[in-house]
Amino acid sequence: MIDTEKKPKATRNAYGEALLDLGKKRPDIVVLDADLSGSTKTAVFAKEFPDRFFNMGIAEQDMVGTAAGLALTGKVPFASTFAVFETGRAWDQIRLTVCYSNTNVKLVATHSGITVGEDGASHQALEDITLMRALPNMTVIVPADATETVSVINAVADYKGPVYVRLGRAKVPYVMPDDYQFELGKAFVFNTGKDVNIIAAGIMVGIALEAAEILSKDGIDTGVINMSTIKPLDEATLLSVAESSKLIVTAEEHSVIGGLGGAVCEFLSENCPVPVKRIGTHDTFGCSGKPADLLKLHGMTVENIVKTVRKALNK
Amino acid sequence: MMNAAVKGKVTDVEELKQITKNIRVNILHMLTQAGSGHTGGSLSAADISVAIYFSKMSFDPKNPSWEDRDRFIMSKGHAAPLVYSIMAEAGYFPKETIDTLRDIESPLQGHPCCKKLPGIEVSTGSLGQGLSVANGMALGLRLNNNPARVFCIMGDGEIQEGQIWEAAMTAAHYKIDNLCAVVDNNELQIDGPVEEVMGIQPVHDKWEAFGWHTISIDGHDMEEILRALNEAENTNGKPTVIIANTTKGKGVSFFENKVEYHGAAPTHEEFEKAVEEINND
């Protein structure tokens, strides 16, 4: 549930701190950035461990290739920049030298999604999950809050293989329990609903929890699942909630094409065809604006989730 | 079979030339068997690749992931037959395996795949990417206090890729001197002469301007090649690139400077004639 005691925190800030802790414990951790270390928060690591930090300049393709090379000498590289550049600019490099070569590279991108805000569409990655999910050997993780981010960063440092972690710029409320431990490929079930289950990721988890509260008060039994690992999808959890409810709603700060919504539909259409409604952007670019206004514009709100569920269930 | 492993490096020029002849014959053999593949660029880079592997590199074909090995990246991945031919000669796998080039499930994929063939350091084939990986390896080795060195072969057409120049900046910026890069300057690419398709000259000056110790040589003269490789090894504080001026299709008169043999394999008839030419050279 949303923790109103703790001040909201951006997942990128949690990343910076997690990297620093990891760097103290693990000499094999190295970090690369493409001139955005102040924004991605890798600068925190860079300051403490300058010998293990490589600023690659504004050159994402080279950054990814260099990270692959470092991984091939036993290092565990974390390579960071904005999501749109990390996944789009360097996609072929990720494909060949990270995924096809199966190198132990951690791509941790910040500034994903629409909540980048004022910088506008050029900087708002709404296709990155799709791009990464399509690649064999790639694991895709979207943490919901700062607590989960720290746990994810530690988990992916231990995991051997390519990983994409999607983080955000804006502050998000704490939603995960304090003692939560991320487990790769395992969804976190807040509760299950007999009427509808909302499968959410990233900042949409908190929004889904708020929507569920309203819906439940209206007598619509609503569950919320944090599907932070989008690939591999937690199929068992998804199947069990789909089988026991009337409607599935997906909620992501990303295009529904090939994102969480796409992944859920692909699985359910073959294994448990139930009605699915997808919250996310629908084949469109973002634009400049305040994050809250942009979320509203694209229907990534409590109100729109509530409305979507009511309409789909005729209630 | 010669022992190319850690202990016995070949420094004799005549012996290296003989190995190069064998490598050329095996390249053509496997391409003819496969019926497709890249002839011209495999032959042009043969001399310097042989010199790197057999006179400079420490490696153990029985333990391809040996930590202290020197690393070789064929960034122009379409020269895979050259790498496979060298690896077969060096004892990474039985020579018969070269007959499976490009077969389904063969470790000898059309372009090098590190997950299918131990001894390939990283998969290549999409051009422009090897130098970045080579930089990363060189930086990793440096952090590990490992004196091993990294070699990376690029094509001259390949350096039209922007990423090469990103990597060129990186190597100079981080003073990566445990790296020796090679540009196989054969002046042809698929669509025609490099200077007609997208001019890259002056190549030597470009690398120099990017902060590299740059050596231009005749890429088919074994003595010049060895001198350049020694110079690279003894250059500190900056990366070295060898611009190897070469002939595409080198060693076989009817393949030389023929753009159509960039991506075509010899026929059986051509193969017989080619072997004769190489052996009589």
Image: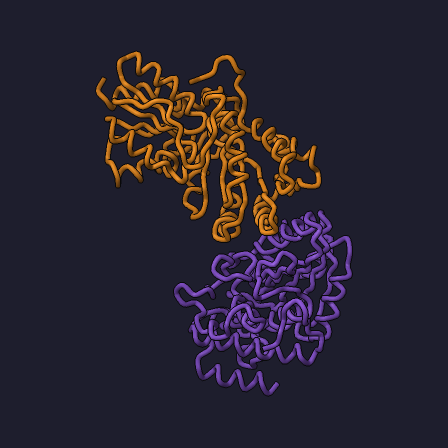
Q: Is residue B218 visible?
A: yes
Looking at this view, name the residue that lies furthest to the left.
Answer: A314
Q: Look at the picture and state if A159 lies above or below B71.
A: above
Left or right of residue B201: residue A111? left
Give A181 or B244, whichever is nearer the viewer. A181
Where, quadrant-wise, is the C terminus of chain B in this rendering? bottom right
Which residue does the image show at 28% across and 24% down from the upper left? Answer: A196
Which quadrant of the structure image shows residue A197? Answer: top left
The answer to whether B256 appears left or right of B8 in the picture is left
Tell me which corner region of the image, top left, top right, bottom left or bottom right, holds residue B277.
Answer: bottom right
* Residue B249 at x, y percent in the picture: 56, 75
Exactly how many numbered labels are in the figure? 0
What is chain B's hue in the picture?
A: purple
Q: Residue at x 64, y 52 (%)?
A: B135
Q: Position of residue B68 (x, y in %)?
A: 65, 58
Task: State the residue in front, B65 or B273.
Answer: B65
- Above or below residue A199? Residue B252 is below
Spot occupied by residue A184 in the image (x, y as percentages of width and height): 44, 36
| Residue at x 63% of width, y 64% of height | B59
Rendered view: A9 above or below B216: above
Is residue B163 visible from the viewing direction of this image?
Answer: no
Q: Is residue B274 above or below residue B141?
A: below
> Which colour denotes chain A?
orange
